[in-house]
């Protein structure tokens, strides 16, 4: 597959490449080359006032101002596929760079919803946060998570919070005024969020989308600055620590990601699991050997085939004060 342009350039026009997974009557679950026009006529946007593609385009454009983006090996397989009923489309992009292990995006469009799942993982030589944007939109409501997910503990490790988040507290407060806390988060999941996290729910409106787009741009530009100024780690023990922290994060997300149900409904259990573990949370099977039960034994039950859904306290309001200090305990 050719991506076009020279090795020093990046073309946004290649976000739609000729790899679509189609569901045939044999339902073999295999990926195969197909026409890019197939299925597009069945796509109906649930809300004309929002397009998450412009979020991705902005991020890619900004990233190319800071570093050379190269297509990830994942791009060949994970590019575009149709839902089982032919009424929805999943579009995927993936890249890598000198400090970025994986930049990947998933946009889902169907008759009833739009979804953006955009995440950027740093390489293990850097302890920078993980950029995370998860947006779920229907004609009436939106569920949003936007954050610089901390690689290390910001609740108990004051030095890490000071290094990456102390100066960003005003940015978080700015958008907390527009986007109130979205409801309960468990004490386990809160450890994967930063003091500036936007976790919210709001009704669909052009004004809300404009503010969300503004927040996305501000958060991503700040993240790029953090990555740009990050110094490559040479201490093997710290690199291993970063690697383990990212694997723990991936293990949690692959197990607990709330979008699993949507994916299974759209493309079936087998493809959903493949997309989840090998694309969205790529590295969960390669960066480490520990399993979910190793990292989070408190979720285990006597029956090894079952896991507890929630453990511990739930936070119904923002658990950080205006100075970024954790209030949960």
Image: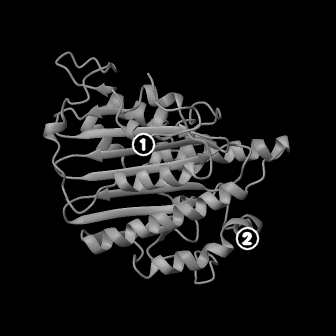
Give neighbour class at mark 1: few <14, some 14-19, many 20+ (Cα, 10 Å): few
Q: Please name whichever residue, 185 or 60, is drawn nearer the observer in this view of the structure.
A: 60
Q: Residue at x 20, y 66 (%)?
A: 140
Q: Position of residue 115 (x, y in %)?
A: 32, 51
Specify the quadrant of the image occupied by residue 163: bottom right
Element type at mark 1: helix
Left/right of residue 126 with respect to residue 202 in the rendered view = right
N-terminal label among 1 and 2: 1
Q: Residue at x 47, y 62 (%)?
A: 146
Left/right of residue 282 with respect to residue 34 in the rendered view = right
Is residue 53 depicted above or below 292 in this figure?
Answer: below
Q: Residue at x 43, y 49 (%)?
A: 257
Specify the quadrant of the image occupied by residue 28: top left
Mark 1–mark 2 Cα distance, whole angstroms, equals 36 Å
Disc 1 to disc 2: CB gap under 8 Å: no
Identify the disc placed on residue 12.
1
Q: Please name whichever residue, 34 or 317, is drawn nearer the observer in this view of the structure.
A: 34
For the C terminus, which image quadrant?
Answer: bottom right
Which residue position holds label 2? 162
Left/right of residue 290 with respect to residue 279 in the rendered view = right
Element type at mark 2: helix
- Camera-nearest label, 1 or 2: 1
């Amino acid at each position: 597959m050719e991506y076009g342009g020279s090795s020093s350039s990046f073309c946004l026009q290649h976000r739609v490449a000729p790899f679509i997974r189609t569901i045939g009557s044999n339902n073999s679950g295999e990926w195969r080359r197909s026409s890019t026009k197939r299925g597009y006529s069945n796509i109906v946007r649930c809300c004309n006032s929002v397009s998450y593609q412009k979020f991705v385009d902005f991020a890619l454009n900004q990233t190319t101002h800071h570093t050379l983006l190269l297509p990830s090996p994942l791009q060949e397989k994970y590019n575009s596929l149709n839902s089982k009923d032919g009424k929805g489309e999943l579009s995927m992009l993936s890249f890598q760079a000198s400090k970025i292990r994986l930049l990947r995006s998933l946009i889902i469009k169907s008759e009833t919803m739009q979804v953006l799942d955009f995440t950027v993982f740093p390489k293990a030589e850097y302890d920078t946060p993980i950029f995370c944007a998860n947006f779920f939109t229907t004609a009436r409501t939106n569920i949003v998570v936007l954050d610089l997910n901390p690689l290390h503990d910001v609740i108990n490790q004051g030095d890490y919070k000071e290094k990456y988040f102390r100066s960003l507290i005003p940015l978080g407060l700015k958008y907390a005024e527009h986007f109130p806390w979205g409801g309960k988060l468990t004490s386990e999941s809160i450890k994967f969020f930063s003091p500036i996290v936007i976790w919210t729910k709001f009704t669909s409106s052009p004004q809300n989308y404009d503010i969300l787009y503004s927040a996305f741009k501000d958060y991503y530009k700040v993240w790029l600055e953090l990555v740009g100024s990050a110094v490559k780690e040479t201490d093997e023990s710290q690199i291993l620590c970063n690697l383990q922290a990212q694997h723990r994060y991936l293990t949690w997300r692959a197990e607990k990601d709330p979008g699993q149900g949507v994916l299974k409904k759209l493309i079936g259990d087998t493809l959903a699991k493949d997309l989840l573990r090998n694309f969205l949370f790529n590295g969960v099977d390669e960066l480490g050997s520990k399993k979910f039960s190793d990292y989070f034994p408190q979720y285990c039950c006597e029956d090894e085939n079952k896991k507890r859904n929630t453990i511990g306290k739930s936070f119904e309001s923002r658990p950080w004060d205006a100075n970024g200090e954790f209030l949960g305990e």
